[in-house]
Amino acid sequence: MKAANEKTAYLELADDLQQLIQSGSLRVGDRMPSIRQLAHDKHVSITTIQSAYEVLENRGFVEARPRSGYYVRPRVPASNRLPAQPESSRKLSTVERPDLFDEVFAAVNNPDIVPLGCAVPYDGFYPTAKLASLSNKAFRDHGASALRYSLSPGRIELRKQVSKRMLRSGATVSPDEIIITSGATEAITIALSTCCKPGDLVAVEAPTFFGILRIIESLRLKVIEIPVCPINGIDIDVLDEISDKHPIKACVVQPNFQNPTSSVIPHESRNRLVKLAQQRDFTLIEDDLYGDLTFDNDRPTSLLAHAGGENVIHCGGVSKTLSPGLRVGWLAARSGHAEMTAIKNISFTSNPTVSELVVASFLADGGYDRHLRRIRQRYQSQVLQMRESIFKNFPEGTRVNSPRGSFVLWVQLPLQVDCERVAHEAMSRGISITPGSIYSASKSLTNYLRINGGYPMDERIRQAIRTVGKLCQQQLYEKA
Ligand SMILES: Cc1ncc(COP(=O)(O)O)c(C=O)c1O
């Protein structure tokens, strides 16, 4: 679904300038108008022009020359520098906990570690003051009952707001079709528990978010990996072939800004994916935690919006937009609510009422859209700068994803680089990064890294990127 066409000024400007380059009005080698002059002529801020030039740089249309400005460059197809799609092993396997998992997790709240590991944004981006005032309001309005357990399916105020938000992703879902969970993690756990029993086979993306693999491990399920294209997401042809040969019970998929590749399944392929699940009778468990973080305000759809949404369980939440610590997530599906509620009740993980009330108020009138516009702009600028810095400091032949939303960088290094070793060595220098092997059930992808781009590019982060780049270079020298 195309959301309201509210493109930000710098993206519009980037598109206009790109048009001038593509039409030949600005030719290779031409100097682009100076930032100051263009800001004056267009009556916009210098930051807007800088952001527009960064977008053009990332798209490969211009290059920055120190102390001279931006110049039109010969076109380098962006795809040349994107990570490759992994091969499909087509093997069934179990999932084992990787060695580095606890170390990476422990680093999240340690201020002495440079936080390039877990996909957690800078604390300063959370709307803390507004959340605090909404929390006060919750206690004023509800008194001690704000401290109670919130029992499944969760507060109706919140389910109504989630139902309204789901319209932005093209899906009409009634509050009765929604269950509030403790983060997206619990939503995915309940969804998998509903359609699988221990030993059943689940299709997962390769690479995929390591948390999904941990859930699968804890439920004692078997997996088969489906490769993810760094642009178009899960390879539906391979899923078609595999689901024809094997009795898969579910497929866990992230259609929107997939973690770690940031890929997005093309709109026109989504009907096919949902129909495939309906035809082969497996459940598509959609993890849509990053969909709201699109850079161009054009929020991609939920799979629930396609082919009637049967066989789809949508999992969402506010961990990447408002706060991971509030622990507010949700499930939405066309059927199976009684069973999902029963599973949630058995685990006895009722939700904090106050978190539900605060998120409900924020979504109702806390300025959620304004907040999203602000953080999307920041993340876009950060990942552009970080991508550039990686190309500058990492070995030749390094490839990096080019996110159109969210804030993670997926980096492919030359084959000789052992990224688990890089991650260990980086940790001993106070830098957390995650190696590609933890994003795959088969622990392959040994020459990949994921880098968190959720922090402003200050000198500490720049220095950490330089250090990680050196660690990678060192391995190449050793092996040369
Ligand atoms: C793709 C994806 N799904 C789920 C989660 C977990 O979300 P939550 O913190 O809401 O449980 C994360 C967290 O990083 C994630 O990246």
Image (cartoon, rainbow, N blue to C red):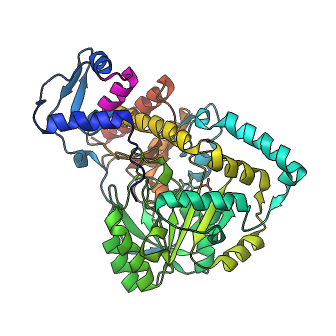
Whether residue 26 is visible here, answered yes or no, is yes
Q: Position of residue 318 (x, y in %)?
A: 60, 51
Q: Position of residue 444 (x, y in %)?
A: 41, 60
Quarter of the image where one finds residue 317: bottom right
Figure label count: 0
Viewport quadrant of the N terminus:
bottom left
Range of residues picked out in magenta: 42-53
| Residue 343 horizontal side relative to residue 49, left or right | right
| Residue 249 horizontal side relative to residue 413, left or right | right
Q: Main secondary structure of the magenta part?
A: helix
Query: Which residue is rendered at x = 63% and y = 49% of the image?
Result: 363
Whether residue 394 is visible here, answered yes or no, is no
Closer-to-camera residue (467/270): 270
Query: Which residue is rendered at x = 35% and y = 78% of the image?
Result: 240
Closer-to-camera residue (115/421): 115
Magenta segment includes 120? no
| Residue 26 horizontal side relative to residue 375, left or right | left
Q: Position of residue 227 (x, y in %)?
A: 36, 65
Query: Which residue is rendered at x = 46% and y = 29% of the image?
Result: 457
| 190 up-or-down from 45: above or below | below
| 473 up-or-down from 354: above or below | above
Query: Which residue is rendered at x = 52% and y = 67% of the image?
Result: 172
